[in-house]
Image (tube, rainbow, N blue to C red):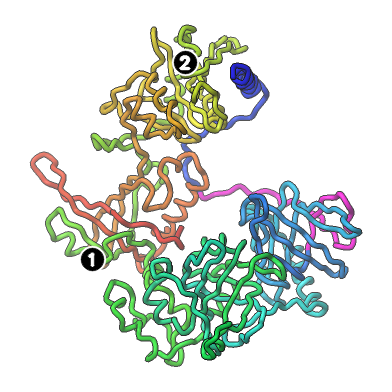
Amino acid sequence: MLQYLYCLHFCNRLSLCLFFFLPQICTQPSITPFSGTTSASVAPKYVYTPLNCLKDGTVVNLYGIVKFFKPPYVSKGTDYCSVVTLVDQSNVKLTCTLFNGNLDSLPKIYKNGDIVRFHRVKIREYNGQMQGITSAGFASLTFDGTVGAPVVPRASSKVYTFIDEEQKTVEELRIWAASNLSVSGPEAKLSDVKPMMFFDLTCQLVGKAKVDGSSFLLKVWDGTKCPYPTWKVPVEAKELEGDRVLLHHLRNLTVDVLVYDNHVQLAKSLKIGSFLRIYSIHTKQASAKNEDISSHIEFHLHGGTCYGRGIGILPENNPDVEELKTISILPCSAFCVVCAPVCLSGFVCLHDKDVKKENNSFLISDLESPLQRCQQLSATVLTDHQDMSNTMLKTVLNNRAPQQYRIRAKLRSFKPQKLYQSVKLHCSKCNTLQEVPNGDAFDVILQGCEATAPNPELQSMSWYESVMWTTQDENRRKITIHFVKHYEMLQRPENTLLMIEGGTLKEIWKLTRRFKCVIPVKSKEDDLELLDLSAPFLLQGNIKYYGCKKCSTPKSIKNLSSLAEKREPSWEPTEIAQVLGIEPLQYVFVMKFTLVDGTGALNAYLFDYEKFFQIPASEILTNSFLQQKMEMTMNTLSPPGRKLDDLPWLECFIKSYNIADGMKHQVYYQIFDTTVAEDVV
């Protein structure tokens, strides 16, 4: 045991030396203003290799037409795998086996005949044939292979180049494929199916349920009716997910597809309402002693990936989805859901004048679940109190506080315009708000601690292991790092809590990228202690955690040892704050919305941690992607330069409350139980 501990100690010392003294480029996270501008660069010139010129051991870029593919599936490891067979004008075939841990990083192929562009494919020879596999930096674009269709790439990465010359390449491949290849798959509609068929089905998911450990039920439809009675898989009502009213009224149009084995994991993750292409469904006649039942047919997606079996998720702009949405399916008089109680529960009735009808029938796009329909008419979604009815703003303004309302309004303006300024720190105990300190303030506090030399007597105690060294710069600073142990053992870096004395801000940020938690401390006579609470008491990843000066009563650092004694210490910030006597401050969005509905206007405050934008306020200041996402959301809710009539409607809950200001009582309004709709973010 002692030898093992020594090895761990030595490895940590060595890794720290390498970590700090090897030349590195380190960027310090900072408060970054939101910006909609991007820098333009010259697109690189890529060389593409024809399939008849491939050589073993090379890494190439290529174009090809999909002759066969297997939708991504979970491999024996943790990665997803997709198999694609390509051809080009040389009439040479190339089969590529592609792996990636991220499903979205694999090619977005929807059907045979699609055209793909692969960058950085590694070529190897096996049994006299060339094969392609993913290599570092692999990326793909996929295009619809239909002649005359828009040349719109489906990209596996957010950044890519596509020049006019390549558009010509895609169009040339389309024309060649139309004349020389037969790549149409065994597609069929439900109205065309027969027993003992294997076919691809483009459909919409309206329900799903767990059946057993090796199979899963998908209830789907495509706007047509199967000519045979279909087998209904018996499942308990509580297990079935989907809109009950819609499932009832589509009971004669949906079919039950039972999926098995390796397809179950993906089937569980599918969202109700999503559009799917299920590849190689098998229809077979039900086996039963009763002659009436024997005429039923069953739908199965068997396990494995032979013949391209799998499930693909289609985007809303897919041409087949657009066609599916325009299928006329039911006469108005037959679809009694329009008169059902659902119309009285705050959802839009399908008899509404804005609903499109053709020849006294509904379109598949009209028959989404009532909740989806409601979300489409509002850029926000209510998360509770669905039974409340809407109130006009004029009425809200004339009523006394406190009260709660459901309103429907438009966002005329908002503050602050610089969205990063909306992030504050809030103490839930004393209810105070404060600005988030910038990195310079923390750096100043750290520099002030440099004069306090680490106390050698406080090193390597029973519950932590210490490493100390002197820097080689002119300041000759002494840095000490204390690694908190678990059962007298040092943990892996990703599970380690450490304390640092004498470190600079740059060095602390380096540590946060490698270790789970970092606590800045300084030495006193008989113990380590936290820095001034103007500095963060804890750093985890890119997030700095602060404590309330008014409500905190800092305790001894020794209290951390009680967390280290737990069976599996999680080092959660709330637990650390509690044992150290810190009342944590929480990151929160604070904004003022000016809402109008034609009857009046009022200012409503947004006070939200992460529910409204579906973005954690704690991460927004150091994550440029989340900053862009929030900016895009606000540009959708209140598009700059747009007329009021063109703004989207927002359904919100607001509550009124009184604030005493001297001798006066001012009424304020706050948004609650409201979130931005998924299709907005």
Q: Is residue 353 visible?
A: no
In percent of width and height, residue 105 lies at 64, 55
* Mark toward the start of the polypeptide (2 vs 1): 1
In percent of width and height, residue 138 lies at 72, 51
* Residue at the farthest left position: 663
The secondary element bearing badge 1 is classed as loop
> Residue sitting at 32 percent across and 22 percent down?
554
Q: Which quadrant is home to the N terminus?
A: top right
The residue under label 2 is: 462
Q: Which residues are magenta?
A: 36-63
The secondary element bearing badge 2 is classed as loop
The amino acid type of the residue labelled 1 equals: Met
| Magenta-drawn stretch contains 508 | no
> Residue sitting at 19 percent across and 53 percent down?
656
> Residue sitting at 36 percent across and 25 percent down?
534
Q: Separation of disc 2 and disc 1 at Cα?
A: 59 Å
Can you tell which quarter of the image residue 183 is in?
bottom right
Left or right? Give the position of 132 relative to 321.
right
Residue neighbourhood size for the residue with mark 2, other residues' Cα within 10 Å, grouped as few (<14), some (14–19), many (≥20) = few
Specify the principal SS of the magenta part. Answer: loop
Q: Is residue 322 visible?
A: yes
| Magenta-drawn stretch contains 53 | yes
The residue under label 1 is: 388
The amino acid type of the residue labelled 2 equals: Ser
